[in-house]
Image (tube, rainbow, N blue to C red):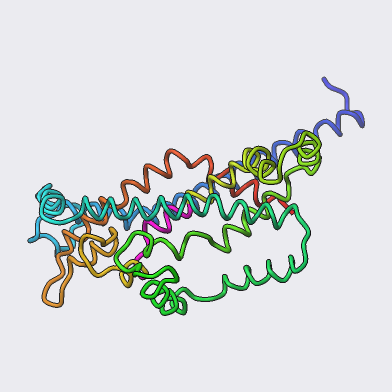
Amino acid sequence: MESITPSNIFKDQGRVRAVGKAGDSWTSKFFSYLVLTLIAFTMIVPFMWMLSTSLKPEKEILRRNIFPIEPTTDNYEEVINGTDLPLWYKNSFIVAVISTVSVAFFDSLAGFVFAKYNFPGKRPIFIIFLTSLMVPTEMLLIPWFIMSSNPPIGGTWVDTYWGIAFPGVITAAGIFLMRQFMQGVPDELLDAGRIDGVSEFGLFWRVAVPLSLPAIGALCIFNFLGNWNAFIWPLIATSRSEMFTLPVGIQQFSSEADTPWNLIMTGASLSVVPLLIVVIIFQRYIIEGIALTGLKG
């Protein structure tokens, strides 16, 4: 029989605390996973409804059944073969790539300058960039359209890829993101590069950019997704069907007399495919970029 000593009492108390902590940990994990599962289910339901509606024949559209009774792929054949959807896909891709490449370069360069250089007016200029985030996009539509109709170099930007893409070639949010991240780039590496004769742009391109790839990757992904889903400005900047982007083209399915929800949901389902591919392939950069950027002072 084990004798009762102070050491044994302390051991028993330690076991009780360990069991209590394990029970609390299991309970907290259970409720955490339960809450996250409910949130995930709430977010997945609209996508399930969209996909289900895209497989329904027209006679089932207004029924309350979630899944199609007689599933069909005729909607996909009609949208792909009977509309300019492939052309709208191309337009959206070109515009998104132009904006993403531009943002990746210019926002990173501006963020590097704000993070690593001191110059007159640095703080006021940066504050102006930040305050521009408070301006609603709707207030900028008229200036953008005036600029597109009467560009500085002559001609017109309406119904052109550049006219659709130019409002997003550089973003204040991207500059802020890259500035916060590049503040963590060691100054010693930049000084070592200067001693070796590297130019200032070379320091940005050969030192800062490789160290900031997670933030640049996250910035590119968010920018690509935003431009792919953009609707208001592409709707204003285009007047010909062959220049429509995907959201604008899908909107053309509806009319005052009829709204073919099966075709709209089919187009929406097809438009989501590239976004899912991008997120699945590059989700590591999204998580890494957000996590690391949040640690920068």
> Which x, y percent locates residue 9?
86, 33
Asked whether residue 167 is in view, the answer is yes
In-image side of 66 versus 119 (left or right):
left
**Along the line of sight, which residue is nearer the eye, 89 or 148?**
148
42 relative to 257 in the view: left or right: right
Give the side of residue 12 with respect to residue 131, left or right.
right
Task: Indicate whether residue 28 is drawn in magenta.
Answer: no
Q: Is residue 248 above or below residue 77?
A: below
**Is residue 32 or residue 244 the one in the foreground?**
244
Residue 11 position, x and y percent, is: 83, 30
Q: Let me know if residue 13 appears in the view.
A: no
Q: Where residue 264 sits: x, y (%)?
A: 20, 61
Extreme-front residue of the structure: 154
Looking at this rendering, what residue extends furthest in the top direction?
1
Q: From what the image shows, is residue 235 above or below residue 226?
A: below
Image quadrant containing the N terminus = top right
Image quadrant containing the C terminus = bottom right
Q: Give the range drawn in magenta.
A: 222-232
**Residue 106, image quadrant:** bottom right
Eyeballing the image, is 8 above or below 48? above
